[in-house]
Image: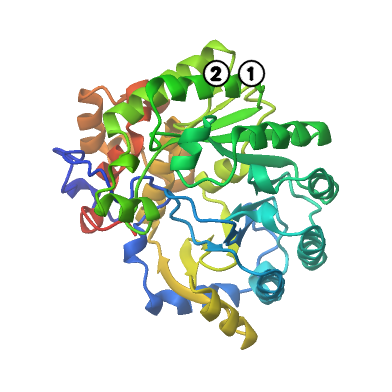
Amino acid sequence: MTTESTQFAACTNPICSEPDTGNYFVSTYPPFSTWTADQIPAVQQWLETPASSARNTPLGLYVHIPFCIRRCHYCYYLSYANRSADDMDDYVDCVLQEFSLYRAAPAFSKRELSFAYFGGGTPSLLSEPQLVRFLTGIQNLWPWRYVEEATFECAPQSVTAPKLRLLHDMGITRISLGVQDLNDEVLRMSGRVHLVEDVMRAHDAIRHVGFDVVNLDMIAGLSGQTDTSFLSSIERAIEMLPDCVTIYPLEIPHNTPLYRLLQAEIREVRPASWELKRARLASAFERLEAAGYTLRSAYAAVKDPRQHLFIYQDLQYQGADLLGIGASAFSYLGGIHSQNLSSLEEYNARLCAQSLPLSRAYVLTDEERLIREFILHLKLGSADVEYFRTKFNTDIREQFAEPLAYLQSNGWLSMDDQSVHMTRQGLLHVDRLLSAFYLPRHQRLRYT
């Protein structure tokens, strides 16, 4: 493999700075800021290439539903608040139209879906008739014969028993409930529209229906949060007996309402420091482990690792193809990244013209594909040496010798003949460490 990675520009100190604001969470590689419109033709060429019946790469579906009652202060995902029912109807039509264009592509002619994820925004804001039309339309175009997991994000205030029964009956297996915190004042200061009582009502309804996996999504470091209030929220969450708990340290990208509030020097919303966020995260996972949970990644703990899976994440991190539909949605197909238009009006107009709503793309080299998978495996805790030798004909210990030595010397990871393994401290810092493995041309770039 032709390599540039022996010249890591930042291997001497890849974590020298950590701004309070800006993007922190690493979800892919290379950085989004390197994706460009002039690489879109590569996506179209891939789509026109007939699929081989022997292709065994898993294929997943991501559907973005960009509607909310109100935009939360910390939210950096594309979302539109207070849109009408007609707007949401039109959007459902557009997403189904986009899906039909992809379904007709030769590249998907012999492929089956392995997993699906509905995110937002607030997918549960759709009405029952809209959900029926949406899910029925998707499954009519591409039956879910082999879908092992289908996740649906829900916000507490928009959850109803009839919606949940409908989701369950239409194949949703995993519910992710956006809790964020279990303190009403913290929720208010974060711009959330729900209260703790809404969370409890929604969780009881979800449990009553009987989904395979229920996840509670929480955040460490929200405005108004204290060590005491945060750990009280974690204890209360544990009492709810969720199958999975995800806890992310708050990040403040520049496109968030929280960033604008900070720029206006509104002291009420001042968030916690990174040191404090990591301390809370560490304490939370210690509490979860004491309650019988197992840490499955840098930000998630599960009751039973064999039963409570997160296939959407695991298969993506192992190089699965992912088709993203909806405004601003991301795809990864055949080693090519792409993203849809973020403007709802432009997205709708492109589909009215029977054209894919792509805005930018990036074709990865073999080395970039290796780096992408390697850093994502580290977010799950470890990277298996034999896995990468078999898939990429590369010894990761040699390929990444310099940054691995640096991180090992600082106690962030350990290595043996079988794997590269993140230490507990390494997992707490993992997203700030990953740039050590970037190629020189991707170092110190704006992430998005």
The residue lying furthest to the top in this view is: 290
The residue closer to the viewer here, 228 or 60, is: 228
Label 2, secondary structure: give it: helix
Q: In this view, does 345 lie to the left or right of 104?
A: left
Q: Residue at x 73, y 44 (%)?
A: 148
102 and 19: which is toward the camera: 19
- The image position of residue 258, as x and y in percent, is 36, 50
Residue at left offset 64%, top offset 70%: 107
Which residue shows up at 29% across the image and 56% down it? 2
Within 10 Å of disc 2 (Cα), the crowding (few <14, some 14-19, many 20+) is some
Question: Can the viewer see residue 333?
Answer: no
Compared across the picture, whether 85 is left or right of 41 comes to right
Tag 2 and tag 1, C-beta contact below 8 Å: yes
Quarter holding residue 255: bottom left
The x, y position of residue 201, in whole percent, is 72, 34
Q: Quadrant of the C terminus?
A: bottom left
Q: Which mark is residue 239?
A: 1
Q: Residue at x 40, y 37 (%)?
A: 222
Count of all numbered marks drawn on residues in the image: 2
Q: Residue 235 carries which label?
A: 2
Judged from the image, the secondary structure of the residue bearing numbered disc 1 is helix
The reply to whether residue 257 is in sight is: yes
Residue type at mark 2 is: Glu
Q: Residue 395 carries which label?
A: none
Amino acid carrying label 1: it is: Glu
Q: Nearer the viewer, residue 43 or 71?
A: 71
**Real-space CA distance between mark 2 and mark 1, rounded to the nearest whole angstrom:** 6 Å
Q: In this view, does 152 lie above or below 101?
A: above
Q: Which residue sits furthest left?
A: 12
Bin the neighbour count of mark 1 within 10 Å (Cα to Cα): few under 14, some 14-19, many 20 and up: few
